[in-house]
Image (cartoon, helix red, strand yellow):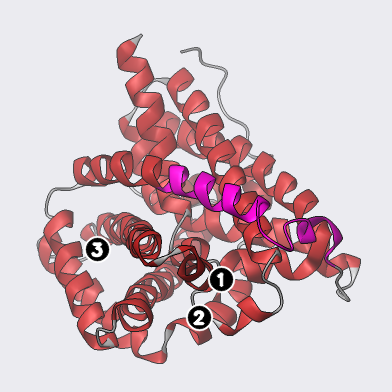
């Protein structure tokens, strides 16, 4: 039982760490997909949480059943060999864009909060990322098992502080002019995009862990954790609307009001969450490209990081607001096929 409990926690924390990336941890994703829709966000967050629990488990179980080496194997099982290969190529492009967003988010944290140049932040993050990726999946699991629990504790702290500040009830009363179609499309776009991207690390994780029950319990744990952090972030951001929209890193603006010590720790945690998602996504990309390129995995990782550095020159805010909604829309087809795909009825 202790062994299974450990696997459940590792799966849950890695799941949360993979989803809680640059857009999520900084507050940009929560703002774009939920908070801007006012009090309706509480309901759409509940819908997103259900999808994270259900489809996260389904993805990892499918990966184990087909013995997937990378997310391309899963896409071939979903779409068929030819179309699955095309989808994987598209996901490759998308993941490169997402990794550039992660890197840009890290550089923005250095600039906005630590008074260190954006370019220096990018380089420091790249070097740290390469150092961790040389250790493979074990490093990803270890980093997430440390960072995510601390992030959860700080989320509770921010939520507690929000409930004792003016505007605490705004998440219940905040209005929106958005149409019902846009409001209710948001949880589907959000989960489609994030789950499609998370397959880069969840597929090899599911294939590596053969314990079906641990995968299911880990997905429940991870999915609820994601839902809780989404709701807590929404409540905090709602209390500071509309002024909080001026920040490239909205949660950093909120943390600034909690005192310099708390702000420093919280910003470091945001950076850590960005970092965990970055190393997970780059690892998944390297696994897919390893079968195609006749060069060592470490060289593939270096090439991916260089490309992300070049793309990150566009900046964090423009990348999130432009690419995330577009990728979410395109990922809807992937989401529908994941829903329809049946898994085996195997036991534990």
Q: Residue at x 47, y 61 (%)?
A: 25
Q: Is residue 45 left or right of residue 176?
A: left
For mark 1, give the secondary structure.
Answer: helix
Q: Is residue 130 left or right of residue 90?
A: left
* Circles 2 and 1 in contact, beta carbons < 8 Å: yes
N-term mark: 3 or 1: 1
Q: Position of residue 261 (x, y in %)?
A: 34, 61
Image disc number at residue 248: 2
N-term mark: 2 or 1: 1
For mark 3, give the secondary structure.
Answer: loop
Q: Is 129 included in the stretch rendered in magenta?
A: no
Q: Is 326 in front, or is 108?
A: 108
> Dot 2, crowdedness within 10 Å: few (<14), some or many (≥20)?
many
Q: Residue at x 13, y 48 (%)?
A: 135
Residue farthest to the bottom?
Answer: 314
Q: Is 160 included in the stretch rendered in magenta?
A: yes
Camera-nearest label, 2 or 3: 2
Q: Which residues are magenta?
A: 151-174
Disc 1 target residue:
28
Q: Is residue 62 left or right of residue 161?
A: left
For mark 2, give the secondary structure.
Answer: loop
Disc 3 target residue:
292
Instruction: Identify the image quadrant of residue 325.
Output: bottom right
Residues at marks 3 and 1, CA–CA distance in whole angstroms: 35 Å
Q: Is residue 163 left or right of residue 297?
A: right
N-term mark: 2 or 3: 2
Image disc number at residue 87: none
> Dot 1, crowdedness within 10 Å: few (<14), some or many (≥20)?
many
Q: Position of residue 149 (x, y in %)?
A: 39, 40
């Amino acid at each position: 039982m202790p062994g299974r409990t450990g696997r459940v926690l590792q799966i849950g924390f890695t799941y949360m760490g993979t989803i809680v990336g640059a857009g999520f941890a900084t507050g940009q994703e929560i703002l774009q997909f939920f908070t801007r829709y006012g009090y309706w966000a509480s309901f759409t967050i509940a819908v997103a949480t259900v999808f994270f629990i259900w489809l996260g488990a389904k993805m990892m179980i499918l990966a184990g059943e087909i013995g997937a080496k990378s997310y391309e194997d899963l896409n071939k099982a979903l779409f068929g060999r030819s179309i699955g290969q095309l989808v994987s190529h598209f996901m490759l492009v998308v993941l490169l864009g997402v990794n550039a967003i992660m890197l840009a988010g890290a550089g923005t944290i250095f600039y906005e909060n630590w008074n260190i140049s954006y370019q220096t932040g990018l380089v420091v993050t790249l070097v740290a990322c390469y150092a961790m990726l040389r250790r493979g999946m074990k490093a990803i699991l270890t980093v997430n098992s440390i960072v995510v629990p601390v992030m959860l504790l700080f989320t509770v702290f921010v939520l507690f502080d929000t409930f004792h500040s003016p505007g605490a009830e705004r998440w219940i009363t905040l209005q929106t002019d958005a149409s019902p179609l846009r409001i209710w499309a948001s949880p589907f776009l959000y989960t489609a995009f994030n789950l499609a991207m998370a397959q880069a690390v969840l597929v090899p994780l599911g294939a590596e862990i053969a314990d079906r029950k641990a995968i299911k319990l880990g997905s429940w744990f991870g999915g609820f954790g994601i839902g809780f952090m989404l709701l807590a972030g929404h409540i905090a951001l709602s209390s500071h609307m509309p002024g909080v929209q001026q920040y490239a890193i909205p949660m950093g603006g909120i943390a600034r009001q909690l005192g310099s010590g708390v702000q420093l720790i919280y910003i470091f945690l945001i950076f850590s969450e960005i970092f965990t998602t970055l190393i997970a996504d780059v690892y998944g990309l390297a696994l897919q490209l390893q079968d195609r390129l006749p060069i060592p995995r470490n060289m593939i990782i270096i090439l991916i990081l260089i490309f992300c550095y070049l793309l990150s020159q566009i900046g964090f805010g423009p990348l999130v607001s432009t690419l995330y909604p577009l990728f979410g829309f395109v990922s809807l087809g992937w989401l529908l096929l994941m829903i329809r795909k049946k898994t085996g009825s195997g036991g534990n």
